[in-house]
Image (spheres, grey):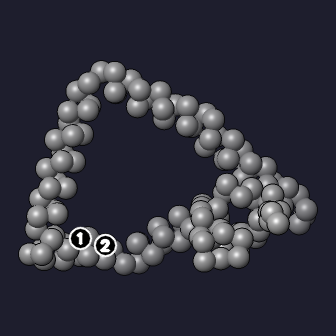
Amino acid sequence: MTEVREEKVRCSRCKLELEREMFWKNSSRNNGLQSSCISCHRSQVKRYNEKNPGLNAAHVRAYEANPENADKVAMWKRNSKENRAERMRDPEYAEMKKQYWRDYYHNVRKPKIAAQKAAAKALEGGQS
């Protein structure tokens, strides 16, 4: 039996009904999605990081300071710096990356932002 999923989901924070794509996946939940939308979750993370400055940096420093992780950290730093610098020197790669982000913005982000604004406007109109 195939499961029919609702097209819109209500965010537990902003209370807007949004498309399923506006939520991150969470396999532990019944509907397979986080309870709050991506924008609410990001603002929550931003507030948390503002209240707890340096907490993530302290975690990274502790991980890098652990001798057991020295090989992993050294390899990651070497590979990420060398590979990124090498890729960025390639004009084809740089152009492909620019085109990818242009397409992503116009085909994915812009419609999602428009849908969020329309939902917020509809909600405001219904409450007036």
Could you say where residue 86 lies in the image, as x and y percent from the top left?
20, 33
Could you say where residue 45 lies in the image, as x and y percent from the top left?
48, 70
The residue located at (60%, 65%) in the rendering is 25
Q: Tell which residue pokes out farthest to the front in this image.
A: 1
> Of 3 and 6, which appears nearest the observer?
3
- For numbered disc 1, what is the local secondary structure? helix
Marks 2 and 1 sit apart, C-alpha to C-alpha, by: 6 Å
Query: Does residue 96 show up?
Result: yes
- Residue at the disc numbered 2: 56
Q: Is residue 114 left or right of residue 100?
A: right
Callout 1 amino acid: Val
Whether pointer 2 and pointer 1 mark residues with C-beta atoms closer than 8 Å, the reply is yes
The residue located at (26%, 24%) in the rendering is 90
- For numbered disc 2, what is the local secondary structure? helix
Q: Quadrant of residue 75?
A: bottom left
> Of 37 and 121, which appears nearest the observer?
37
- Residue at the disc numbered 1: 60
The residue located at (31%, 77%) in the rendering is 55
Q: Is residue 26 left or right of residue 74?
A: right
Could you say where residue 52 lies in the image, as x and y percent from the top left?
37, 78
Callout 2 amino acid: Asn
Query: Does residue 120 show up?
Result: no
Total marks placed: 2
Classify 52 as above or below 2: below
State which quarter of the image contains the C terminus. Answer: bottom right
Classify 31 as above or below 113: below
Q: Quadrant of residue 59?
A: bottom left
